[in-house]
């Protein structure tokens, strides 16, 4: 096929806005969103073997062992929809080992986006975050309150969104960030994530449009 689907990787500290940006990217570009956090939470809530293994790690804010997560990502990436529509990988790789696993499989994104947000803002974003189990939408009590009382009443909080656990999640992120970035230096794009989400999206959108153009040109020339 002449069509070259986009492959995007989005990274950033806990609550830097990865999930929120992915909602907008998917809406415009139709990429297959692969969020390891969402996949793992789904396994936990349906009580699968993977879920039972992952639960304690997640609830205490630690990383789930590499081999569990890598197997899950590998199988999801190889599905037909991801191959055809392109993928948006969110929350993976989270360690140097995970980045190396992808490299060994020759899986490379077109762009590596890192959302940059100061720590004190991240903590506030986690504490105020609420999720709608019906639509999957991400809210924030102050920044993005629910549209109705009906939605408000059903919102849930994540067990790892307490101040203490957020701090340890942040430390884990900071410990790993540089080693992962070093794998993708040539395609790294750091974006200021401490701005309104539409503004952040505009910047991501123009990067993706440019890549799409470049890919099309390369296809036509080849
Ligand atoms: P995961 O689900 O990936 O959590 P995370 O990286 O901590 O990221 P978050 O989901 O907390 O935040 P986000 O960046 O998506 O922000 P959001 O858009 O929601 O992982 C959870 C756990 O799973 C890990 O701790 C680990 O145990 C396990 N795991 C996952 N992947 C793994 C892997 N690869 N290896 C091993 N273990 C793994 O936004 C946050 C809040 O801010 C929301 O309330 C939102 O409304 C608000 N907000 C968003 N954007 C803005 C903005 N621009 N301005 C103001 N507010 C905003």
Image: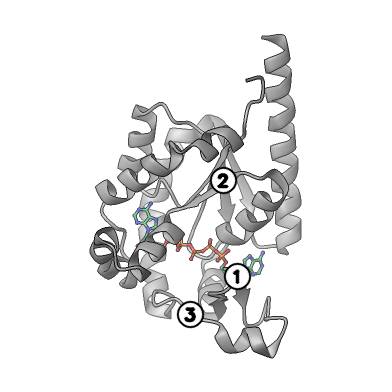
Q: Earlier in the sequence, mark 2 or mark 3?
A: 2
The residue drawn where x is 48% and y is 63% is 14
Q: Is mark 1 within 8 Å of ligand 1?
A: no
Q: Is residue 162 left or right of residue 20?
A: left
Residue 104: image x %, image y %? 34, 28
Secondary structure of residue under mark 2: strand
Q: Earlier in the sequence, mark 1 or mark 2?
A: 2
Q: Quadrant of the N terminus?
A: top right
The residue drawn where x is 51% and y is 79% is 127
Q: Is residue 22 left or right of residue 205?
A: left
**Label ID, residue 32:** 2
Q: Is mark 3 within 8 Å of ligand 1?
A: no
Q: Earlier in the sequence, mark 1 or mark 3?
A: 1
Decide which of 49, 221 is in the foreground and name it: 49
Decide which of 121, 80 is in the foreground and name it: 80
Q: Is residue 10 left or right of residue 48?
A: right
Mark 3: give few (<14), some (14-19) or many (20+) Cα within 10 Å.
some
Residue 35: image x %, image y %? 48, 54
Decide which of 123, 45 is in the foreground and name it: 45
Is label 1 or label 3 in front?
Answer: 1
Mark 1: give few (<14), some (14-19) or many (20+) Cα within 10 Å.
few
Residue 50: image x %, image y %? 27, 58
Residue 67: image x %, image y %? 25, 46
The residue drawn where x is 30% and y is 63% is 51
Mark 1 = which residue? 135
The residue drawn where x is 38% and y is 34% is 102
Mark 3 = which residue? 157
User: Distance of mark 1 from mark 2, alpha carbons?
Assistant: 17 Å
Mark 2: give few (<14), some (14-19) or many (20+) Cα within 10 Å.
many
Q: Is residue 186 above or below residue 62?
A: above
Q: Is residue 86 left or right of residue 36?
A: right
């Amino acid at each position: 096929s002449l069509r070259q689907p986009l492959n995007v990787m989005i990274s950033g500290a806990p609550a830097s806005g990865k999930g929120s940006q992915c909602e907008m990217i998917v809406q415009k570009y139709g990429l297959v969103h692969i969020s390891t956090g969402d996949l793992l939470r789904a396994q936990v809530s349906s009580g699968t073997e993977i879920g039972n293994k992952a639960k304690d790690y997640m609830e205490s804010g630690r990383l789930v062992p590499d081999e569990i997560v890598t197997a899950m990502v590998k199988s999801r990436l190889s599905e037909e929809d991801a191959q055809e529509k392109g993928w948006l990988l969110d929350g993976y790789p989270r360690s140097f080992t995970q980045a190396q696993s992808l490299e060994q499989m020759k899986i490379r994104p077109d762009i590596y986006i890192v959302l940059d947000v100061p720590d004190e803002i991240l903590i506030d974003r986690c504490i105020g975050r609420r999720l709608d189990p019906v639509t999957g939408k991400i809210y924030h009590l102050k920044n993005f309150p629910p549209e109705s009382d009906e939605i408000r009443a059903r919102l849930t909080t994540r067990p790892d969104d307490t101040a203490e656990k957020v701090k340890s999640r942040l430390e884990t992120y900071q410990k790993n960030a540089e080693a992962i970035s070093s794998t993708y230096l040539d395609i790294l794009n750091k974006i200021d994530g401490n701005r309104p989400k539409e503004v952040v999206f505009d910047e991501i959108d123009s990067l993706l449009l440019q890549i799409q153009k470049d890919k099309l040109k390369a296809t036509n020339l080849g």
